[in-house]
Amino acid sequence: MTWKRVIQYFLILILLSLIAFIFLMNRDLVRIYGGLTKKVDHEQFSRSAEKIAITNVHVLTADSRKFRPAQTVHIDNGLIVSIDSMPPSPGDIKIIDGSGKFLIPGLIDSHVHLFKSPNDLLLYVANGITHIREMIGEENHLLWREQIIEGRLGPDMYIASPRVGSFGRIEGWFMRWSQGFNTINNEADAKVLLQEYANQGYDGVKIYSQLNKESYQAINEIAPSVGLTVVGHIPWSIELTDLWNSNQKEVSHLEELMNALRREFGSIDGEEDAGQFLNFVDDRSKELAVNLFANNVAVTTTLWLTESFVRQKFYLDEVLAEVKLEYENPGISEWNERIPQGLGWLPLVNRYKMPDAASLSSEDLENRKVFWTVYAEACQLLLKNIYQGGVMIMAGTDANLPPAVPGFSLHDELESMHAAGMTT
Ligand SMILES: [Zn+2]
């Protein structure tokens, strides 16, 4: 064999290894977003065509203010046909005794991530959630929505576009491959991308922290003309006054507003700073409330998730034992140890763990605990103040981020909102 031949074989070997590596990486990217998990046969849950009566149940009125006692709810072919105080009719095949129980319209989770996990659609329905708002849309979601419209069991869906940020060429390519981001850097990019999103069937454009100011303003100008709403984070490149002058009518999450206030305040180091920061948030959030209300900007909560950060950093086992981990897509919760700061749930891969915890002094650890505790308390205070200021609040969970199990987590969210000062 000549040297030339050896080098040829060697190059072929390298090429084949590279192809195999890329194939395996791509496959793993599908797995860690839940795409290789066995799919539940959703046909087995198709809705019943028979006549059903739910008797003697308390029904929440349309304005959500009070319950009508002892009602009969008549259901035919999967749809409610009437609600009254009549007894069940002779044609009713199935009677469900609702004595001592309450019936409300479906719940909405305003901020979820399905990723590649269609089984979640069933978890939502099982938890009484009949409408979800997907905040990092992808083509699969548009397809599932079509199937639901045609009769597949699942919630109604609002679908925001993939996330948009401003990145350089190489970083942008990587962010797209690994996390589905789209990059825009100016008005011309924005025009092309938003038209594309509208054509694909998305309802809104999801803006992210790294978006530059020119692109932010361009998106806000163009979006209404192509029928898209602007939703998402407050980009680091803008001031709150830019938000008031924009078409962004929805901020996810409370945490984003709190972090904007934290940037105004400066660093929080220890108990004394923490106390001062809370006072600052109390004052400033009342002013924020006036602007949010005047500009008709709604805020999505994800409060329960924010409250979990300190617990995930310091008592992760306890938190994981409390949630319905067995319903979480194992692809997501188990993640991949080689991909840091991802969406993993379990101790080795947890998104919110402190990688440097072992090297911190007890004093540093105590300061971190103070920081993450006040981080959540500031969000609670912010919620209370903007709620009292009449701002539209939307319950959202960020489901599939640890430890928000799709469906179940909305009930935790509602409890957190109530604990922070909202009425039931
Ligand atoms: Zn989210």
Image: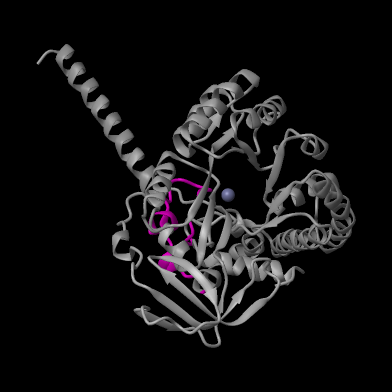
Which quarter of the rendering shows the N terminus?
top left
Q: Which residue is drawn at 40% across and 82% down?
A: 95
Q: Is residue 337 magenta?
A: yes
Q: Which of 198 and 237 is in front in this view?
A: 198
Q: Is residue 97 magenta?
A: no
Say above or below: 335 vs 180: below
Residue reaching furthest to the left: 1
Q: Which of 323 and 80 is in front in this view?
A: 80
Whether residue 343 is visible to the viewer of this picture, yes or no, is no
* Residue 75 in the image, given as x and y percentages of width and height: 44, 71
Give the side of residue 200 with respect to residue 210, left or right: left
Task: Give residue 334's quadrant in the image.
Answer: bottom left
Magenta span covers which residues?
322-347
The chief SS type of the magenta part is loop
Q: Nearer the viewer, residue 192 or 401?
A: 192
Which quarter of the rendering shows the C terminus?
bottom right
Say above or below: 249 vs 174: below
Q: Which residue is drawn at 52% across and 35% down?
A: 181
